[in-house]
Amino acid sequence: MADIIVRQANEKDVEPIYEIERLCFPDPWSRDSLRYELEENPRAFYIAAEIDEKVVGYAGLWWIEDEGHITNVAVRPGFRNRRIATGIISVLIEFTVSKGIKHHTLEVRSSNEAAIGLYEKHGFKVEGVRKKYYLNNGEDALIMWRHESKSE
């Protein structure tokens, strides 16, 4: 298998991230929203995973004081089950903790057992529910938090 490179995303990644959004989410972010996130939003931090110079996954985070709100994590279909999402989340957490983030949070569909398990492996725990959060089907979102431990 080719090496996976996880790096900070940049403006050249708008199109491949937008394509992954459309493939992975029933309510994808718009191209303009992603462009804003990658080019203008001073609170946004995105990383991309690539194989053979092709973006195959990404994650976004909003940096708010000592908290990081993870906005999206996605891996292109056909590249799943290769531990790419694990690598993306590990790099995102390691880097942001080293820069002062003490708490990470995210919302995840209550039915997305694979994602919930992945986040739990990274120390996230369910701390709340947003009822009927997802517009496309009214599904609840679990609010998960990860708090920095003393050893980090």
Image (cartoon, grey):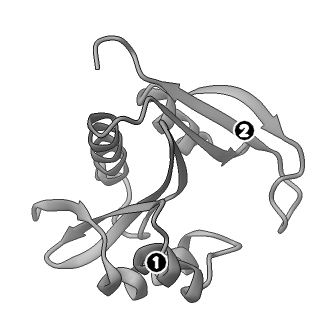
In the picture, measured across the screen, residue 97 lies left or right of residue 142, that is left
Which of the pair 69/123 is nearer the observer?
A: 69
What is the three-letter code of the residue carrying label 1? Glu
Q: CA distance from mark 2 to mark 1?
A: 29 Å
Query: Does 73 appear above or below 93?
Result: below
Give how far across and how far down residue 61 sits, in percent: 48, 54
In the rendered image, residue 51, in percent from the top left (x then y), is placed at 18, 70
Asked where in the image residue 56 lies, by quadrant, the reply is bottom left
Q: Determine the residue positioned at 58% across, 30% down.
A: 145
The residue at the far top in this view is 150
Who is closer to the viewer here, 23 or 67?
67
Residue 10, labelled with which disc?
none
Q: Which residue is mark 2?
A: 142
Residue 34 vs 90, above or below: the answer is below
Residue at image point 42% right, 75% down:
38
Q: Which part of the image, by quadrant, shows the N terminus?
A: bottom left
Mark 2: few/some/many CA within 10 Å (<14, 14-19, 20+): many
Q: Which residue lies at the image location 43% right of the left edge and 28% below the top edge?
A: 121
- Number of numbered discs visible in the structure rendering: 2
Nearer the observer: mark 2 or 1; the answer is 1
- Which mark is on residue 40? 1
Q: Residue at x 57, y 80 (%)?
A: 22
